[in-house]
Amino acid sequence: VALLDIARGPALWASLAMCFVGIAWRLWGILRRPVKPDWSMPRSTATTAGALRMIVRRMWHHETFRERTLLSSVNAYAYHIGLAVVFFGFLPHIGFIRRLTGLSWPAVPGWLFIVAVGAVFVGLGWVLIARLSNPVLKLLSNFDDYFSWVVTILPMVTGMAVISLALDQPYPAQPLNPVPVAIHLLSLELLLVWLPFGKLSHAFLVFVSRGYTGAAFARKGAEL
Amino acid sequence: VSDIDAQHPVDLESKRFSIRKPAVRCDKQGEQPDAERLQAAMQAFVKDMGRAAAVYMESCIHCGNCAEACHFYVQTGDPKYTPIWKLEPFKQAYKREAGPFAWLYRALNLKHPVTVGELEEWQSLLYDSCTVCGRCTMICPMGIDIASLISQARHGMFAAGLVPHELWAVAERAEREGSPLGATPKVLKERVEWLADDYEVEVPLDRAEAEVLVTFSSIEIMKYPESLVATAKILNHAGYAWTLSTKGYEATNFGLLSGNAAWQRDMTMKLIDAAVACKAKVLVLPECGHAYTGLRWMGANIYGKPLPFRVLHISEFLAENVQNGRIKVKQVPKSLTFHDPCQVSRRGGAVGAPRVVLQALGVELRETRDHGSLNWCCGGGGGVVTIHRADELRYRAFEIKMKQLDATGAELTVTSCANCRQTFDDGQAHFKWGRTMGSLLELVAENLQG
């Protein structure tokens, strides 16, 4: 119980604090960089619209790249959506969020949860195989890529170990096996701690990066 | 000066203009020690690091998609041509020296300091195998504008004295003589006199005041002088008060391509000063891709305030005047395919202009499978066409273009970039290809009414 108390208490708050402070630090480190005024005559002044359009447009590849990127795009969507369904749709997770924030919503059906779990494991498995076997990915990959993979799949693996009741049943506030639950929670906290430092930060940088290019290209009247 | 000219003689005999193939390459300029080179490279790279570049440096997720958009990777399958990999030393340097967690990287030595040896190794990736075409930007799921980072990395490379022999030589000549290919003011005057006589066309030079200032690429002046004639015919036909200026006529900017910001500024300011001096309302850029980036999108920022005149690529000028009726053209009953210059179309936003002109000409436009903003580069942009050791790789990239153009079955093939055109001429000779790349400008001039 002591370990669970730590995981639910100080470790959780510390990891959340590190996550938010880390994100803020990283964004500040980028945004404090100078921006030179652009004196060129714009073709369009709708740069905010351009930024927003780019954020949406780049959610799917241009048709011409389909042959080469379709599988990786579909896979990326599969495990990203899978992760979202697992985290936000599983009843015990909703209970966890409710305890933290007071917010709650209906859980997804059990079958959808199972599909989502499958999509995450298959998808992340594929990602790792591709990273280890594709010459381009092998060349680009570094510690960040592999460690980010580990901290992403770890909560899934530890989560599997604590599923002990029917998927649509509410779990008791004090679990029967507190140590595996504590480990599961600690693995999530590891992810939170790592998120601002490594490539998992694409969760927020994706909007900044796409937005900048979208605004710049819109100004020039270039296609996004 | 004569020593430099003797060491790097301009080659105006081959299909593409550059300096002659050096017997002994000199890809490292200056005598400074490695530590100084490194410091200069890092300072130049980090000094220019604005917010957008920092965002891009932080955002790569190592998905490798950019490789699939790069002609050099697609044609060779060699992972080192993955666009984002071409920036690897600079990414490392950024993380270690300038990123939000730089202190952590340094304290724990998570990224080793970049060495001059690494920069030398990366020289061919940053110059020979990147045309700065920006196709990788179109595929990146994070929207990273990799091409802009390559240009910035080239600043670092130039500061370190690590520019490919030929590119450095033409850039140095451009700074010293005003033209990378020997199109000095004297040569320009001689050419103008010769062309005016031979083609019986009026070419105003150094008028005190003019509504339109016309500029050229040295490739046009030296290799395609018909472009000068075509421009003159069109401007005269449209009834503009226009001029050429010996003070600012060279639109190519090898300061931009090689990575020397000071030289880029000098070359840009010549054009701006010439336009201001003759009170031009419009400065027309020639059929040249990077000239458009250099002046249309970067010129005012070098000037430090909005330019007191409009800057138009020649294809935009033609489109505008076809639409307002000042240029009247005959119909051309032929099928035609158009090669989009990357810097004008994808990166410049002027995809529509040439198509307006082609529509007015009444041609049957047959687009390549990938066209407009998603076109494949000819392989010669970004200064690559000047570098002899890059030839074989460039030809591999060119094969994509040949296949796509052939697949259209069009009778005519035209573009609006003289650098693309000379790359096509060179590729045509190399592959004994049946197509000859033409010029949109010349096509219009040949089909003026009246």
Image (tube, coloured by chain):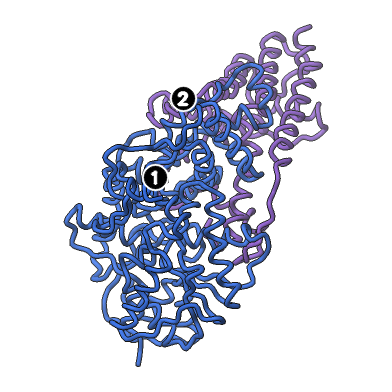
Chain colours: A purple, B blue
Residue at the spot 34% in from the left edge and 73% down from the top edge: B191
Residue at the spot 43% in from the left edge and 40% down from the top edge: B163
Q: Position of residue B272 (x, y in %)?
A: 57, 67
Which type of secondary structure does the marked residue at label 2 adopt? Answer: helix
Q: Position of residue B89 (x, y in %)?
A: 51, 31
In the rendered structure, the answer to whether residue B369 lies left or right of residue A127 reads: left
Q: Label 1 crowding class (10 Å Cα cut-off): few <14, some 14-19, many 20+?
A: many
Is label 1 in contact with label 2 (beta carbons under 8 Å)?
no
Amino acid carrying mark 2 in the image:
Leu
Residue at the spot 46% in from the left edge and 34% down from the top edge: B85
Outermost residue, bottom direction?
A: B450
Outermost residue, front direction?
A: B2
The chain letter for the residue carrying disc 1 is: B
Depth check, front residue: B375 or B328: B328
Quarter location, residue A159: top right
In the rendered structure, the answer to whether residue B155 lies left or right of residue B107 reads: left
Amino acid carrying mark 1 in the image:
Cys
Which residue position holds label 2? A128
Q: Label 2 crowding class (10 Å Cα cut-off): few <14, some 14-19, many 20+?
A: some
Which residue position holds label 1? B70
Outermost residue, right direction?
A: A102
Q: Position of residue B178 (x, y in %)?
A: 46, 60
Depth check, front residue: B277 or A40: B277
Depth check, front residue: B425 or B252: B252
In the rendered structure, the answer to whether residue B314 lies left or right of residue A84 reads: left
Which type of secondary structure does the marked residue at label 1 adopt? Answer: loop
Decide if residue B373 is in sight here.
no
